[in-house]
């Protein structure tokens, strides 16, 4: 471990770029995301649980609504996700 690196730094990888996040989406998720963006939704981040498929998290506006994009592209807003404000 480098002198300036903390344990937290090693556990939390740098946030993915927009392109890196989109590369993890299925075709159905990309189509859905493109439609949702016209209604003010944004791809915020992708959760990557161990040994499970990535989970794209989308928000509307300033967190007015939060949801995930299912593998088939359907928006699921019946989720219990807490999103921190951006710094």
Image: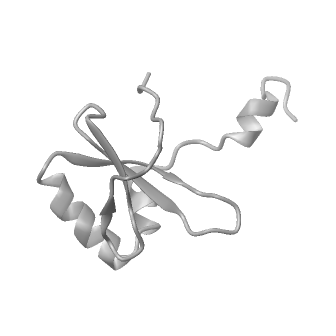
Locate residue 72, reporting x and y percent: 36, 77
Total labels drawn: 0
Q: Is residue 84 left or right of residue 28?
A: right
Q: Is residue 76 left or right of residue 2?
A: left
Closer-to-camera residue (53/23): 53
Residue at 64% x, 58% y: name it: 49
Name above or below for residue 71 compared with residue 79: below
Locate residue 37, reporting x and y percent: 18, 53
User: Which residue extends farthest front?
Assistant: 78
Asked which colour scheme the image uses, the reply is one colour
Closer-to-camera residue (61/24): 61
Q: Is residue 48 left or right of residue 67?
A: right
Residue at 47% x, 67% y: name it: 24
Locate residue 76, reporting x and y percent: 35, 59
Where residue 83 sits, quadrant-wise, is top left
Where residue 3 sits, quadrant-wise, is top right
Q: Quadrant of the C terminus?
A: top left
Residue at 50% x, 49% y: name it: 16
Locate residue 69, reporting x and y percent: 37, 62
Q: Is residue 16 left or right of residue 76?
A: right
Closer-to-camera residue (9/66): 66
Where residue 74 sits, quadrant-wise, is bottom left
User: Which residue extends farthest left?
Assistant: 38
Name above or below for residue 63 compared with residue 17: above
Q: Quadrant of the N terminus?
A: top right
Residue at 53% x, 43% y: name it: 15
């Amino acid at each position: 471990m480098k002198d300036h690196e903390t344990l937290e730094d090693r556990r939390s990888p740098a946030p993915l770029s927009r392109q890196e996040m989109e590369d993890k989406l299925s075709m159905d998720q990309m189509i859905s995301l493109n439609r949702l963006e016209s209604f003010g939704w944004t791809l915020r981040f992708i959760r990557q649980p161990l040994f499970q498929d990535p989970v794209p998290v989308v928000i509307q506006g300033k967190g007015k609504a939060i949801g995930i994009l299912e593998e088939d592209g359907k928006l699921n807003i019946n989720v219990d996700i807490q999103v921190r404000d951006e710094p």
